[in-house]
Image (cartoon, rainbow, N blue to C red):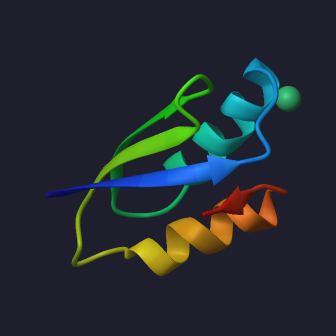
C-alpha cells in the first residue's frame, strides 16, 4: 500500500467533500480516502498494482474539482 496526498481546489461544503470521497472510494485499489475541506486535501491509501495517481486526478476532475 502507498499513501498519496492531493491538493484540491473548488470544494466549498461537506457535499463537495462527500462527492470527492465517493468517487475516490469507487476506484479499484483504493483502500481508504479521507478528504479535508479545511485543508483542501485528499489523503489516499492505495494499492499501486491496481490504481495510480493519474486515475485519482481524473476522477476528481470528472467530479468537477481541480487538482493543483
Ligand atoms: Cu459543496
Residue at (79, 45) in percent of width and height: 10
Name the image quarter holding the C terminus.
bottom right
Residue at 80% from the left image edge and 22% from the top image edge: 13
- Name the side, left or right, on which 55 lies relative to 18: left
Q: Quadrant of residue 66?
A: bottom right
Closer to us: 1 or 36: 36
Residue 48: percent from the left, percent from the top? 23, 73
Q: Viewed as shown, does residue 22 lie left or right of 4?
A: right
* Residue 51 % position (x, y): 37, 74
Identify whether 40 is placed above or below 47: above
How many marks overall?
Answer: 0
| Residue 19 % position (x, y) | 74, 39
Q: Is residue 60 left or right of residue 40?
A: right
Residue at (85%, 57%) from the top-left corner? 64
Locate ligand 1 by image quadrant: top right
47 is higher (above) or lower (below) than 12: below
For image coordinates 66% across by 43% down, the residue present is 20
The location of residue 37, given as percent across then percent down, is 62, 26
Q: Is residue 56 left or right of residue 22?
A: left
- Give the residue at the far left of this rendering: 1
23 lies above or below 39: below
Q: Which quadrant of the structure image shows residue 61?
A: bottom right
Q: Quadrant of the N terminus?
A: bottom left
Q: Tell me which corner region of the image, top left, top right, bottom left or bottom right, holds residue 14.
A: top right
Amino acid at each position: 500500500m502507498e499513501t498519496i496526498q492531493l491538493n484540491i481546489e473548488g470544494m466549498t461544503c461537506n457535499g463537495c467533500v462527500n462527492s470527492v470521497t465517493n468517487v475516490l472510494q469507487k476506484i479499484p485499489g483504493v483502500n481508504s480516502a479521507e478528504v479535508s475541506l479545511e485543508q483542501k486535501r485528499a489523503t489516499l491509501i492505495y494499492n499501486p498494482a491496481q490504481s495510480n495517481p493519474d486515475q485519482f486526478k481524473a476522477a476528481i476532475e470528472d467530479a468537477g474539482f481541480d487538482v493543483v
